[in-house]
Image (tube, rainbow, N blue to C red):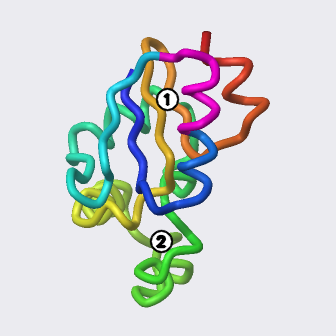
Amino acid sequence: MLFVCYPKCTTCQKAKAWLDQRGVQYELRDIKQHRPTYDELVSWHRASGLPLRRFFNTSGTLYKSLSLKDRLPDMPEEEQLRLLASDGMLVKRPVLVGEGFVLVGFREAEWQNTVQ
């Protein structure tokens, strides 16, 4: 599994502790140092079944400074994906990518039902 996070984020810290407590094996990637590529984001979006807006870190300062709340509804999907790929801090985290699933954000019940 691939665990994409921002180590300073408290939600990411909780998710990492949750994985560690259960002995889940994963590769850790710091989203700020190694942001997701456009192709990864396309793949993750398709595999997740989630609306693309769920991939945006709506509480982040960059999201707010770019006025994305107002801009995203009219922005083409490809442009949204390129924007997400341009800066890891725009991406909602953590992201957990496993065989047959992609989880965005840490919702313990969802992770419990998905991660074996």
* Residue 19, magenta (yes or no): yes
Residue 82 placed where, x, y %? 25, 59
- State which tag comes first along the sequence, 1 or 2: 2
Residue 25 placed where, x, y %? 43, 16
Residue occupying image coordinates x 59% and y 59%:
10
Question: In the rendered view of the protein, which quadrant contains the C terminus?
Answer: top right
* Residue 43, magenta (yes or no): no
User: Callout 1, which amino acid?
Assistant: Val
- How packed mark 2 is, by other alpha carbons closer than 10 Å (few <14, some 14-19, many 20 or more), is some
Give left or right: position of 15 versus 26.
right
The answer to which image quadrant residue 7 occupies is bottom left
**Circle 2 — which element?**
helix
Q: Which marked residue is nearer to the observer: mark 1 or mark 2?
A: 1
The residue wearing badge 2 is 72
User: Callout 2, which amino acid?
Assistant: Leu
Question: In the rendered view of the protein, which quadrant contains the N terminus?
Answer: top left
Q: Which region is colored magenta? A: 16-24
